[in-house]
Amino acid sequence: MARQSYTHELVTASTFPMAVAMLEAGVIGVLAKKTFHVSEFELATIMAAPIFANLTSFMWAMLARGRRKVPIISGLQASVLVLLVVISFLPTVRPGPVMLVTAVVLTRCALAGMVTLRSTVWRQNYPEACRARITGRFTVIVSLIFVIGPLVGFYIQDIAPESFRWLYRVVAVIAAVGVVSFSRIRLRGEKQLLKYERQSAVKPQPHGEPGHIYAFEPDSKPRRPHTVWTILREDHNYRWYMVWQFVGGMANLIGNFALIRLVIELTDGNRYEYTQSILLTTTIPMAVAMVTVSWWARYFDKVHIARFRTRQGLFWIAAQFGNWLAGLTGIVGLFALPRIVDGASRGGGMLAWNLGHNDFADRRMVPLYMGIHVTLTGVRGFLAPYLAIVLLYGWTPDAIPGLTLPAYGGIGVHVFLVTTVLAVIAEVGFVRLRRVVERQRGDTSG
């Protein structure tokens, strides 16, 4: 069953990410600003969309409860391709920019549902001992596509300004092959899983307790289904994991969005401005992530996620501080150095984001734990782009209609000092959590 799933997912990982790459904030944001000439608010919304859409994750998890996961995921993938084609037909003048923002938000909502439910496929079909390595292989392929696809596409865009239209249509056709392939995956133990999900009252099997992976034990007394609040209240370690993940995530998101906006500004009018922008916003970090993900995967399979995050957090701090130093010079090429460090962090982050909750979740509550994680990611994703723009450029007195505000000019590149401090706070928090977890587990390896 694992082999069958792996074969189909390999095809999907080689095709469908082409569509996702065209919707990444560092790609679609450059297109939106340089071709559609969106406003700062619209640009912030586009950059927020990939993370903000995660607010719908818990809704997808609950909607899919008791229903077959693979058909739902395939349907969400197909909707993304339809919207990708819609983008290729939009006018670059009003109301084109508004329609572009709407289409991007809708595609990211669909992708959020896909990611949330895909976690169940990985948990069911791949053994824990090699799960990170298997998903790491998918990640390498996806990263390679993210490195090459947008770079080639926007190099052509530099030469032919309207080429994005046929580019998005061709990508949608290729990605459709991956959708068909994914729809053929069989979920291991699906009947038992659906039987559990349809129970009105069950007692979760304690994490680590031996027993059949699909066994469930009805409660002697009915209880309400678990919700985001009950899980965060009862699972103290996961609650603190979410707290420090929120702080560290805010640091990285604010820093990344601020960097994208600065790169768009610094490359404006340059020769091959699209290519330069994509190199710094997407290609360099994704290329480094691709190279480092296999090392991170081996480490991930050996340690608890709390220890994993303490090591990864050092890269967060270095990347944000490097952005500040590069920003002080105003030389766009110097951003390449912290982007390399950021890429090394992403190599681990792509694994930890998809699999980290498994170190806390009861094996049958993975979608709920992942839903909490993705939903909280959506909260910070909603806030971060607007905070990045405000910290960079401030606001005018009439920024809010009907309300006069004192003028604020922003702090410019010093936004990266703010994100550096946040990254340091998150690192300290993960170190404390690691000590608690290892004391409970009697584990000091890593």
Image (cartoon, helix red, strand yellow):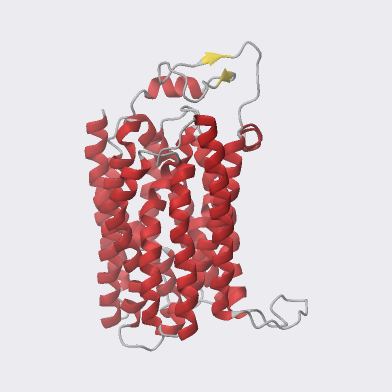
Q: How many tags in the picture?
A: 0
User: Looking at this view, is 261 or 243 the one in front?
Assistant: 243
Q: In which quadrant is the N terminus drawn? A: top left
For this rendering, which residue is in front, 284 or 1? 284
**x and y percentages locating residue 146 in the rendered image:** 31, 61
Q: Residue 79: where, in percent of width, then height?
A: 40, 50
On the rendered image, what quadrant is the C terminus found in?
top left
Work out whether residue 136 can be spotted: yes
Residue 88: tell me if it is visible.
no
Q: Position of residue 142 (x, y in %)?
A: 29, 54
Identify which residue is drawn at 50% across, 36% down: 438
292 up-or-down from 189: above or below: below
Residue at 54% across, 78% down = 413
Could you say which quadrant of the image residue 91 lies in? Answer: bottom left
The residue closer to the viewer here, 137 or 195, is 137
Q: For the point 49% across and 21% down, which residue is it?
A: 196
Task: Answer with left or right where residue 78 lies relative to residue 257.
Answer: left
Q: Residue at x 58, y 50 (%)?
A: 429
